[in-house]
Image (cartoon, helix red, strand yellow):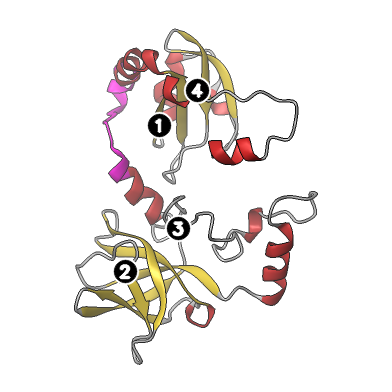
Amino acid sequence: DWEWINAANTFDTQLINISDKTGLLAIQGPKAVEAMQALTEVDLSKIPFYHFQRGQFAGFDNVIISATGYTGSGGFEIYADADKMPAIWDAVFEAGKAFDIVPTGLGARDTLRLEMGYCLYGNDIDDTTSPIEAGLGWITKFKKGDFFGKEIFEAQKAAGAERKLVGFTLDARRVPRHDYAIVDPITQAVIGKVTSGTQAPSLGHPIGMGYVATAYAKAGTSIGIVLGRKTIEATVTRPPFYKV
């Protein structure tokens, strides 16, 4: 992101990278607003999804409180100076004690976002994929001026993408992994590759996402996932996998 922003900076603008000085905590779950409200005068219930406010949090000024969590549940991402994060962590867990707060790692967050069918940059989307292929055409606003890649995406939308990102489920116990081949279950011809896969803790069986030739993208289509010497049958499934 930093390299791209710098490359696109043709304006009289100075850019400063403060990533290494900045910490982040993601506080996610249906009780997040209630549990964290005691730590700030900002009305957390009034911050719309994918919006943020800057204010005091856990006694520290200039904290970004952002409703941009990526787990499928409500909550906030807290951005502050890195040296303030230990104290903020302690305050969060003290305030959340009455709400049964628990610490959770990135691996758990990854299973949650995948159960919702959310794309992870570097896996399901990157600088070689397009939003049309990834099923993100709904956030690609062609009428809102020019942007990088606009002509490519417009042509792709008009002609139809040659491949599409799909979700799939497996009955077998083995978990599909990034870059595993996806094949036609009859001919064994390679039709795509897995981008994300996990054992879904909320569902009790493996799930995954991957790019396949468009002819195989319809929900209910049988596909094969190559796991070593075996090909395991999978079924194309429309995300979210976990439905409330």
Neighbor class of circle 2 (other Cα within 10 Å; few <14, some 14-19, many 20+) is some
Q: Report the magenta stretch's main SS.
A: helix
Residue 140 shown left or right of residue 214 in the figure: right
Q: Earlier in the sequence, mark 2 or mark 1?
A: 1
Label 1 amino acid?
Answer: Ala
Q: Is residue 45 left or right of residue 228?
A: right
Does 25 appear above or below 186?
Answer: above
- Magenta-colored span: 94-108
Q: Amino acid at mark 3?
A: Asp
Would you say residue 7 is visible in this rendering?
A: yes
Task: Check disc 3 and report its element: helix, strand or loop.
Answer: loop
| Residue situated in front as seen by the camera: 81 or 219 | 81
Measured in 3D between alpha carbons, the distance from the residue under mark 1 to the one under mark 3, in whole angstroms, is 21 Å
What is the spatial separation of the Cα atoms under label 3 and label 2, in whole angstroms? 13 Å
Rendered location of residue 145, percent (x, y):
80, 49
Pointer 4 residue: 18
Q: Which residue position is annotated with label 2?
A: 180
Density class for disc 1 (Cα within 10 Å; few <14, some 14-19, many ≥20) is some
Question: Which residue is painted at 31% across and 26% down in the image?
Answer: 99
Q: Nearer the viewer, residue 104 or 125?
A: 125
Q: Position of residue 59 (x, y in %)?
A: 44, 7
Q: Disc 4 to disc 3, how far (Cα)? A: 27 Å
Is 120 part of what is drawn in magenta? no
How far is mark 4 from mark 1, CA to CA?
19 Å
* Residue 220, quarter of the rendered image: bottom left
SS of the residue under disc 4 = loop
Kindly identify the residue that appears in the image at 67 percent across and 40 percent down.
8
| Residue situated in front as seen by the camera: 232 or 31 | 232
> What residue type is disc 2 on?
Tyr
Residue tagged 1: 26
